[in-house]
Image (cartoon, rainbow, N blue to C red):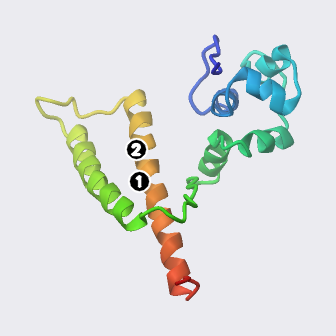
Amino acid sequence: MTFNPVKERRYGEPKAVVAELFEEAGGVPAVMEILDLSRTRVYALADPDSTNEISYTRVAKLTETGATAAARHLAALAGGIFLPVDKDEDADWLAIAGEVSRKNARNIAALMESLSETNRSPGEIDEGEARDILKILDEQLRTLAMQRAKLAVIAAGEIED
């Protein structure tokens, strides 16, 4: 069961981030179990009309499940981006990087075309399109971060044969 709030939350507002964090952590039943809270209390933490706030300790517990909404939000507030690095040692990171590079070239071309007024595009990107594009770009940036981490290990002479 995923977290499906009824009330509208503005993109990027703290309660919207909490709602996204809950969804990523497995929904209300999972959050209830992880945080040892009642359903009413969990809903109140994400309710934009409620004064209830979630503690940093609870956010950390949910983040440990792999939910990244809070980390992404805090990184954006600090003027950066959150880039989790894939730790899969068996991954063929050169092949992955090659594929992501090809996708990146296509995506940048499509983005530039969508920003240009043509018969196929009004030359504007709406909020929903921007969010979709950000998800794609974040995936590509994570792969670049993974490449950098792997290359740093090689450069430091820490690679095992």
Left or right, residue 82 beside residue 27? left
| Amino acid under disc 2 | Ile
Which structural element holds mark 2?
helix
Residue 31 occupies which quadrant of the picture?
top right
Left or right, residue 25 beside residue 8? right
Return the residue at label 2. 136
Report the residue that reaches farthest toward the left. 119
What is the x, y in percent for residue 126? 37, 29
In this view, the residue in front, 123 or 2, is: 2
Cβ–Cβ below 8 Å for labels 2 and 1? Answer: yes
How many residues crowd around disc 1 within 10 Å: few (fewer than 14), some, or many (20 or more)?
many
In this view, the residue in front, 122 or 29, is: 29
Residue 23 occupies which quadrant of the picture?
top right
Task: Identify which residue is drawn at 20% across, 42% down.
Answer: 113
Report the residue that reaches farthest toward the bottom. 157
Return the residue at label 1. 140
What is the x, y in percent for residue 112? 24, 46
What is the x, y in percent for residue 145? 50, 63
Alpha-carbon distance for marks 2 and 1? 6 Å
Q: Is residue 15 visible?
A: yes
Left or right, residue 93 beside residue 41? left
Question: In the displayed structure, would residue 1 be above or below residue 23?
Answer: above
Instruction: Work out which quarter of the rendered image holds the N terminus and state it.
Output: top right
Task: Identify which residue is drawn at 31% across, 56% down.
Answer: 99
| Amino acid under disc 1 | Gln
